[in-house]
Image (cartoon, rainbow, N blue to C red):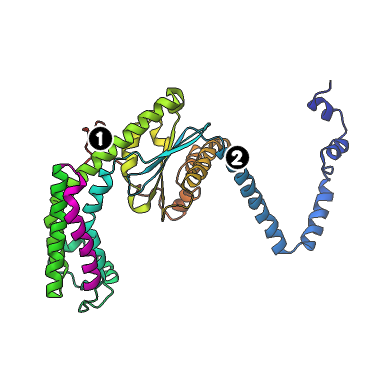
Amino acid sequence: MATRRGFIGGATGVGTAALLGYSATPSAADTSTADTVTAAAVTQTQARESMFAVNAGMRANYATLKAELIKHLAPVVVVQNDAKGGRFTLVTKDGQESVNPVAQTFELAKSIAHTPLGVFSVIASYLADKIPNLPNADRIDPHDLMMVAYNDDTSTAWIEPLKAYAGKLSTARQNLPAAGLPAALQTSCATILDGALAFIKTSVAAQHFDMASFEEFSGSVYPAIRVNMEHASQAQIKGVQDIMKTWRGKVGEAAWADLYCVVISQWTTSVLNQNTIIIKDCMNAAKVATHLIDLPGLEPPADPIFTALDNLARIVQDNIAAEMVFPKDTVVADALKGQQDLLSDEILNQLGSTNVTAQAAPQYNTVATPGVCPVRK
């Protein structure tokens, strides 16, 4: 039986070309004449559109590969950061399962710890845009303050919404003993709520507040907030570690060694994200740098699982494409594999700079004390 090589090799040049669907290669003279005729017949716009079509074709092919690759991604853990400590989804070849593994203590502790921020959100736009003599005055950007304090500081329009918020605080304070919290957490929650209610009462009675009085209140309850943070961290660490251990047993050691984890977060929490810190110690240490992916966004996506897998598919196929498309330039290959833009090095070079200050890598404790958030202070 004739092989493909033998079959094609046995045909004439014109015959082979016709067989494969393209015309024979023209001579140099023919090429010159054809280019002249084409150049005269095609406008610049048409020529450029045909060039744009090449990239459009690439994008279509790329999207097709990515769509198919999504079906083969496994095992993957997708984490949606939320008020409950995170919704975790395990994706395997057999399907998906989702759970919120963190105990309710996490959400309760954080809910009360957010009280000063709740008060601030009501009064912020009525703050005077003049920075008083505060210990942290040099850390406040005057322009940022001016944009936040956009309302008239002599207005009392903040009183009613602040009283409404005080109503919620009062109800929580009254019901606190029935919540069944650990004694230390109940005490810290009471301290935070009492401090906020006292600030609101004084401010409403005087029909006045300022940054100094607010910072006095927030500073006074800060030790109690730290207690709440400790309890929230303990609950989150235990919940996340327990579910990752359960899934590791289900998936098996061999598959778990190649696990990808995608953590969806908002930009403001994408560095040293709480779940990222905990998860890393549950993964194959040799692959954490490439297989633990923080995916920051502006708002939570409508379809978090698809968003995570779609981005992961792009990352995985770029990892392979990088080495095969740029086999002779590992620097450019690394750019395609990572978060760096392919043109960044060339742009830096043309601007007269060969390096840029990179963001410091997150620092983790190698051994975390049980129940304590494993972040270096």
Q: In which quarter of the image is the N terminus?
A: top right
Identify the disc placed on residue 68.
Answer: 2
Q: Give the mark toward the camera: 2 or 1.
A: 2
Residue 170 in magenta stretch: yes
Q: Which residue is drawn at 13% across and 58% down?
A: 194
Q: Identify the secondary structure beneath mark 2.
A: helix
**Which residue occupies the foreground of this view, 149 or 40?**
149
Q: Can residue 284 be seen in this view?
A: no
- State the count of labels: 2
- In the rendered image, residue 211, in percent from the top left (x then y), is placed at 17, 67
Q: Is 121 in front, or is 177? A: 177
Query: In which quadrant of the rendered view does residue 230 lie?
Result: top left
Residue 190: where, in percent of width, then height?
14, 52
Q: In which quarter of the image is the C terminus?
A: top left
Residue for badge 1: 365
Instruction: Give the prevailing secondary structure in the magenta stretch.
Output: helix
Residue 10, given in percent of the width and then of the height, sits at 86, 28
Taking the spot 17% from the left edge, 55% from the top edge, the residue there is 173
Picture coordinates of residue 266, whole percent (x, y):
37, 52
Q: In this view, does 261 lie above or below 115?
A: above
Mark found first going from the N terminus, 2 or 1 = 2
Q: What stretch is highlighted in magenta?
A: 159-182
